[in-house]
Image: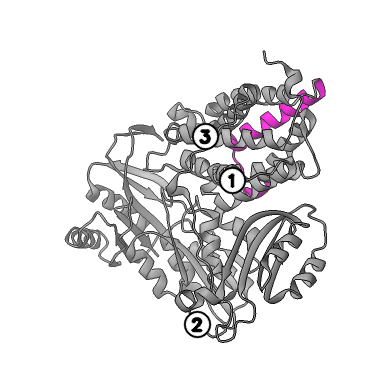
Amino acid sequence: MVDLKQHNAIDGCEYRKLVISAAQLLHVKEEEINELNVFPVPDGDTGSNMSMTIGNAARELANSSDTSINSVAERTARAMLRGARGNSGVILSLLFRGIASALKNSETCDGITLANALKTGVESAYKAIESPAEGTILTVARKCAERAMEASQENNSFEYVLGCAISSAEDALSHTIDENPVLKKAGVVDAGGMGWLLVLRAMENALSNGEDLEYEIQEDYTQKEKADFTAFETEDIAFAFCTEFIITKNDPNRDTSPLKSYLATMGDSLVMLDDGEIVKVHVHTNDPHQVLGEALKWGIYETVKVENMKSQHTSKIVEAPEVALKDYGFVAIASGEGMQTIFTELGVDKIVSGGQTMNPSTDDIHNAVKEIDAKNIIILPNNKNIILSANQVKELSDKNIIVIPTKTIPQGINAMLAFDLDLAPSENEEAMKGATESVVTMQITYAARNSDFDGMDIKEGDYLGLCQGKLLANDTSIDNLFSRFAKEIEANDKEVVCIYYGCDVTEEEAERKQEYLQSLLPNAQVDLLQGGQPVYHYIISAE
């Protein structure tokens, strides 16, 4: 038993160490968590997404000298929000967002504070999920938070409460098999719940060992931003330094208008956004050091960028007239050259590469939003695991963000076809959501592992036929799956069918499948388009 006197409470330095330790363990256990995914399609979401989400925070903390626990917690939550990937990553970021909220006015974190932080985190996560299901990470997090609240009344020691929360999480995780029929059939526990348990275990281990662990930055996780040199005139540069920074506010309730007034006297091209938690500033000035020094009075830096415009404008500035904001802009998530071209031709401004097994982060989507000069930005996730990440962009952007919860590429295409420039944003949102309900989506992929799923004996490498995201059939023959699809299309009275073939399918193969499906549906119109998408050999839409 660890001496509880050593850790009755922790400070910001220790909290930093705990988060980095959790990121390390999730990175090491990433594939093991992925293997718990019971749906047999090639889907590495849970472990990879949770690892990349908290990894974003670990990299941020590894380069930070923050010592106050509220600043460290806020920096962690903000970095995780921006790096959140997939449903599991977003839920993890929301748990840490709640923790940061509970620690906002704290100098240390004792057992009672920890319990309240876990409880607040769970409440934040539940509020974000439209229909929370039992037997998931939410269940595990809720039960361990409930036990933490009880334990904090028994012993107000951080380590005692954390240990009790872990024991409860272990018990809750073991019961997810019984709470979720799909997990019970597969004989595994919930992958997200396992990820949350590992986070807590890593924290306890780091606390006990007292080691200052280093976090190895993964190159493929890093995000690089390009400086925006088009926001200022190049003919007559009165203020040489383009200065941009983001600070986390020390006091979320503090009015930052005095800071804005001060910055206005220091230069021009001032743009300042205060969302209550962070302040983002862009200003042209001749004294960036003085500007940055004043900003430090209001919070802790997250990012800082200073560019000498006079020395760089000849090679890097792209001169462009000031562009008036248009009413609407669009971001779509899609993979495959053909699919991306389709969305571009439909009027989408920015394509974010991603989809199944390649969930973009909230920051990836937000970066696309920032590049569009429009008042209203409509985002099409086109994958159920990206919808939560897309919704988080609303917290980061000052534009009106509308997320159409498209779960498939055909739904996204139908949504774009329903858009009407003359309608108000709320009317377009309703029309585009309605359009997604009229299309039936079918997909053919392959089994990534052996599985006994929903009464089907699935072998690794089998072709899997999905209808509306649910497993319809598995077979060694794609023709047999097309035959099943034809019955579904007839049963739903659909008459217009489009086949999008993937990157691993030749045009000749796809044409043969088109002819075959047309023979099965003589009264339907069957079209063929090159999608170029990975993972899915065919995506079929029926209307």
- Seen as rendered, the residue at the extreme top is 1
Q: Which residues are magenta?
A: 125-154
Q: Earlier in the sequence, mark 3 or mark 1?
A: 3
Q: Which residue is mark 1?
A: 63
Residue 439 in sight here: no
Relative depth, front residue between 24 and 195: 24
- Find residue 256 and report its horizontal and vertical position in percent: 79, 64
Label 3 close to label 1 by CB (< 8 Å): no
Relative depth, front residue between 395 and 491: 395
- Find residue 46 and report its horizontal and vertical position in percent: 49, 40
Label 2 close to label 1 by CB (< 8 Å): no
Please report the residue visible at 48 percent of the width from the left and 56 percent of the height from the top. 407
Q: Give residue 181's mark.
A: none
Instruction: State whether residue 395 is above or below residue 181.
Output: below
Residue 500 is covered by the magenta coloring: no
Residue 536 in sight here: yes
Q: CA distance from mark 2 to mark 3?
A: 44 Å
Which SS does the magenta portion mostly show? Answer: helix
Q: Which residue is mark 2?
A: 319
Please report the residue visible at 37 percent of the width from the left and 45 percent of the height from the top. 472
Q: Which residue is mark 3?
A: 24
| Image quarter hosting the N terminus | top right
Residue 344 lies left or right of residue 296; in this view the side is: left
Q: Earlier in the sequence, mark 2 or mark 3?
A: 3
| Image quarter hosting the C terminus | bottom left
Q: Please tell me whether mark 2 sits on a helix, a strand or a loop.
A: loop
- Residue neighbourhood size for the residue with mark 1, other residues' Cα within 10 Å, grouped as few (<14), some (14–19), many (≥20): few
Instruction: State whether residue 123 is above or below residue 321.
Output: above
Q: Earlier in the sequence, mark 2 or mark 1?
A: 1
Residue 451 lies left or right of residue 105; in this view the side is: left
Give the quadrant of residue 523: bottom left
